[in-house]
Amino acid sequence: MGGWNTLFGYACGVGLYLWLSPRLHIGLIGAIANVIAITMSFTTYKLFVFKTRGGWLQEYMKSYVVYGAAALFSIASLWVFVDLMGISIWIGQALAIGLTVVVSYFGHAWFTFRRIENPGR
């Protein structure tokens, strides 16, 4: 699912930019694209990966925490790869995305969709 979600997010951002750039600022387009991409990613993880029941709103809000942390991790990784290590932007971006997919998966597994067995005991 990580690969699909990454591809979807990329296509959503580019598609919205091509469609809306004559009318909207790129920052607003990016925000809209992120909400759509995070919603798609949350839905695919919930339904096909972690298969949790109920708790839609709570898990959706938690997914924003994970994606916010993943975005900071991605930005830091890109800085390390490109500025500190001298790796080209093309390879650095690919590495940052790959690491972010892994970090997001574990963030969702350990936080967003975590099942608490026997709550209250």
Image (cartoon, rainbow, N blue to C red):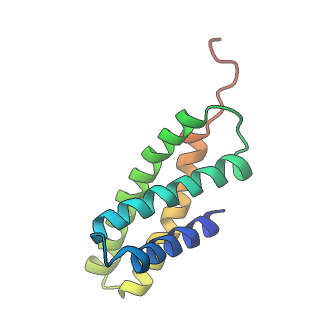
Which residue appears at 55% of the width and 60% of the height?
102
Residue 115 visible in the snapshot: yes
Residue 105 visible in the snapshot: no
Q: Is residue 110 left or right of residue 13?
A: right
Point out residue 113 in the picture as x, y percentages from the top left corner: 61, 40
Point out residue 61 in the picture as x, y percentages from the top left corner: 48, 39
In-front residue for pair 46/24? 24
Quadrant for the C terminus, please.
top right
Numbered label tally: 0
Which residue appears at 35% of the width and 58% of the height?
72
Which residue appears at 30% of the width and 69% of the height?
24
Seen in the picture, residue 47 relative to 79 is either above or below; the reply is: above
Seen in the picture, residue 8 relative to 46 is either above or below; the reply is: below
Q: Is residue 112 left or right of residue 16?
A: right
**Residue reaching furthest to the top:** 121
Point out residue 114 in the picture as x, y percentages from the top left corner: 61, 36
